[in-house]
Amino acid sequence: MLLLVQILIVSFILLNMKTKCYSVRLQSLVSISDKAYKATAFDGSSDIIPASQVFGHDYDVQKSDAYWISAWILDKKSLQYSTKKEAWFDSESGRMLPTYTVERHKPTKIKKTEVEPIKELQK
């Protein structure tokens, strides 16, 4: 029982170290202090985002500037954003965590058929 409690505590700590982020295309992201940015979207909406919740540029987007911003702060702000592109970041280091999918292969069962042995191959 004690081992189960320890495993639950460790998994809770590990889950809290990850932050879900969305790639947000912005018209501008201007630093207004050491602790905050003013973000302006293409529809004209703007809001103040804490610097700790901006995880850097999304270099995969080429037509405009896009930034990785934590999902929980975007829910509270009035910025326009899409949930199509998401990633998980380490809260302490700010690095993107690898994304992977687990697929299980379940083979199909083949029915056994009765076959007469070839006499030439028998000993």
Image (cartoon, grey):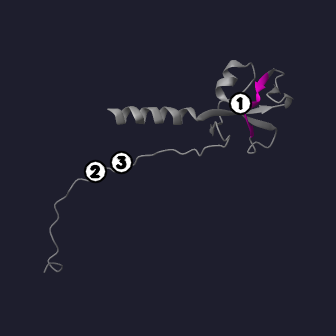
The residue carrying pointer 2 sits among few (fewer than 14), some (14 to 19) or many (20 or more) residues within 10 Å by Cα, namely few
**For the residue marked with disc 2, what is the amino acid?**
Lys
Give the image location of residue 113, x and y in percent: 19, 58
> What SS does tag 2 mark?
loop
> What SS does tag 1 mark?
helix
Q: Which mark is residue 109?
A: 2
Q: CA distance from mark 3 to mark 1?
A: 41 Å
- In this view, the mark in front (1 or 2): 1
Give the image location of residue 72, x and y in percent: 64, 25
Q: Name which quarter of the figure residue 83 lies in.
A: top right
Q: Name which quarter of the figure residue 118 lies in.
A: bottom left
Q: CA distance from mark 1 to mark 2?
A: 50 Å
Q: Which mark is residue 106?
A: 3
Q: Which residues are magenta?
A: 48-57
Give the image location of residue 70, x and y in percent: 67, 30
Please give the residue where the numbered disc 1 appears in the rendered image.
Answer: 53
Left/right of residue 108 with respect to residue 31 in the rendered view: left
- In this view, the mark in front (2 or 3): 3
